[in-house]
Image: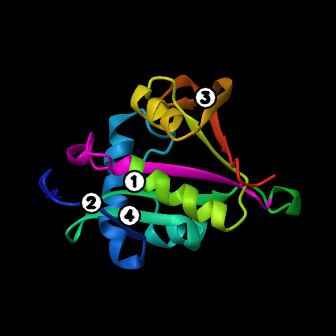
Amino acid sequence: MPVAPASSAVRVAPLVPDHAEQVLAIYGAGIAEGNATFETEPPSWEAFDAAKLPEHRFVALGGATVLGWVAASQVSDRCVYAGVVEHSVYVHPDARGRGVARALLDALIASTEAAGVWTIQSGVFPENLASLALHERVGFRVIGRRERIARHHGVWRDVLLVERRSPRIA
């Protein structure tokens, strides 16, 4: 997938079905790198679409090219967790270092706060230092380590739990 040159402006827009092929390709690239998720292959568009909250999913575009995406899922059906979501953010390898993930997380934070969401959380492999640093820059903190929580390609992996509690929602 060609990626827009660094001089192109990055625009954040809602993630819609027209973006499906590029979004899943970026997800696949993240999976292949080995430090983004326990998943071993991208889901179908139908499964992805059903699992992600429509009002909290965005793409970063360079022209018509998807450079990255962010999406949130409900963490529980229990009403007490209505204000808690779990997110994923992925950037095409050729678009990294251009502020794409920051723009996506800023959009997610704005949309969740407008909707009354008080906590955004995620699990990040400790080896994914770039993701951890980015999350810290936008107000996330590490709240714990899940040791040897699951096997990934036959190897036990830890996951750091990160969360951002909205300062605007008491």
Q: Position of residue 97 (x, y in %)?
A: 27, 39
Task: Name the kind of residue labelled 4 in the image.
Answer: Val
Task: From the viewer's perspective, tell me whether residue 35 is left or right of residue 99.
Answer: right
For the residue labelled by badge 3, is the local secondary structure a helix, a strand or a loop? Answer: strand
- State which quadrant residue 160 falls in: top right
Which residue, given by chain and number where applicable, does mark 3 sit on? 160
- In the picture, the quarter occupied by the N terminus is bottom left
**Residue at (31, 57) in percent of width and height:** 25
The answer to whether the residues at label 1 and label 3 have Cβ atoms under 8 Å apart is no
Q: Nearer the viewer, residue 32 or 136?
A: 136
- State which quadrant residue 52 falls in: bottom right
Mark nearer the viewer, 2 or 3:
2
Which residue, given by chain and number where applicable, does mark 1 sit on? 103
Disc 2 and disc 3: Cα gap in Å? 29 Å
* Residue 166 badge: none
- Picture layout, residue 118 above or below residue 152: below
- Picture layout, residue 145 above or below residue 104: above
Task: Name the kind of residue labelled 1 in the image.
Answer: Ala
Task: Name the kind of residue labelled 3 in the image.
Answer: Leu
Neighbour class for label 3 at 10 Å: few (<14), some, many (≥20)? Answer: many
Which residue, given by chain and number where applicable, does mark 2 sit on? 10
Which comes before the other along the chain, label 4 or label 1? 4
Which residues fall within the magenta stretch? 82-101
The answer to whether the residues at label 1 and label 2 have Cβ atoms under 8 Å apart is yes
Q: Position of residue 96 (x, y in %)?
A: 27, 42
Neighbour class for label 1 at 10 Å: few (<14), some, many (≥20)? Answer: many
Which comes before the other along the chain, label 2 or label 3? 2
Disc 4 and disc 2: Cα gap in Å? 10 Å
* Residue 59 badge: 4
Q: Position of residue 73 (x, y in %)?
A: 62, 59
